Image (cartoon, helix red, strand yellow):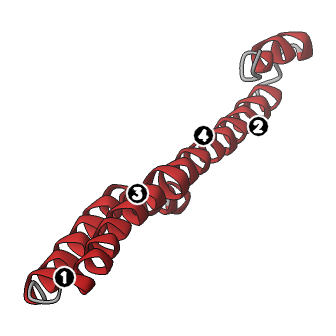
Amino acid sequence: DDETAAARVVEIMGWYAPTLGIIGAVLGLMAVMQSLEDPARLGQGIAAAFTATVYGIGFANLLFLPAAAKLKALVATRTRRRVMVIDGLAAVAEGENPRAIAARLQGYLPG
């Protein structure tokens, strides 16, 4: 469904963020290679290249992947609640004993 798709998009962003960081590092190192004759610029270029890698890994592990896990957990909770409500309404419509319904619905609740 749409909720799961949103979580999946954020998760995929987490998968690709390190790749984008490495691409940034490669581009930065290519720029460094073009300025090998100027040693003063080498340090800045190498630092920028590694910074791109750190940003990619950081965004993946500190932002995107935890956010995706949180979204997945929220979707699972909402889905479990919806199933519980449908199960309860169906049991009431079938005329089941209220205590039996309550006992069955307790199984949907955590802990």
Q: CA distance from mark 1 to mark 2?
A: 69 Å
Task: Name the outermost residue toward the right.
Answer: 98
Local crowd size for mark 2, using a 10 Å CA cut-off: few (<14), some (14–19), many (≥20): some
Numbered disc 3: secondary structure: helix
Local crowd size for mark 3, using a 10 Å CA cut-off: few (<14), some (14–19), many (≥20): many
Numbered disc 2: secondary structure: helix
**Disc ID at residue 14:** 3
Would residue 108 be found to the left or right of residue 29 on screen? right
Q: Looking at the rendering, in which quadrant would you find the C terminus?
A: top right
Sequence-earlier tag: 4 or 2:
4
- Residue name at image x 42 percent, y 65 percent: 55
> Of residues 35 and 1, which is closer to you in this image?
35
Sequence-earlier tag: 2 or 3:
3
Sequence-earlier tag: 4 or 1:
1
Q: CA distance from mark 1 to mark 3?
A: 35 Å
Residue for badge 2: 85
Numbered disc 4: secondary structure: helix
- Residue name at image x 38 percent, y 63 percent: 56
- Residue name at image x 9 percent, y 81 percent: 33
For the residues carrying marks 4 and 1, which lies nearer the camera in this image? 1
Q: Position of residue 99 (x, y in %)?
A: 90, 11
Residue for badge 4: 76
Q: Position of residue 79 (x, y in %)?
A: 63, 42
Q: CA distance from mark 3 to mark 4?
A: 20 Å
* Tags 1 and 2 touching, CB below 8 Å: no
* Tags 3 and 4 touching, CB below 8 Å: no
- Please, is residue 33 above or below residue 16 in the view? below
Q: CA distance from mark 4 to mark 1?
A: 55 Å
Q: CA distance from mark 4 to mark 2?
A: 14 Å
**Disc ID at residue 39:** 1
Give the amino acid at mark 1. Answer: Pro
Sequence-earlier tag: 1 or 3:
3
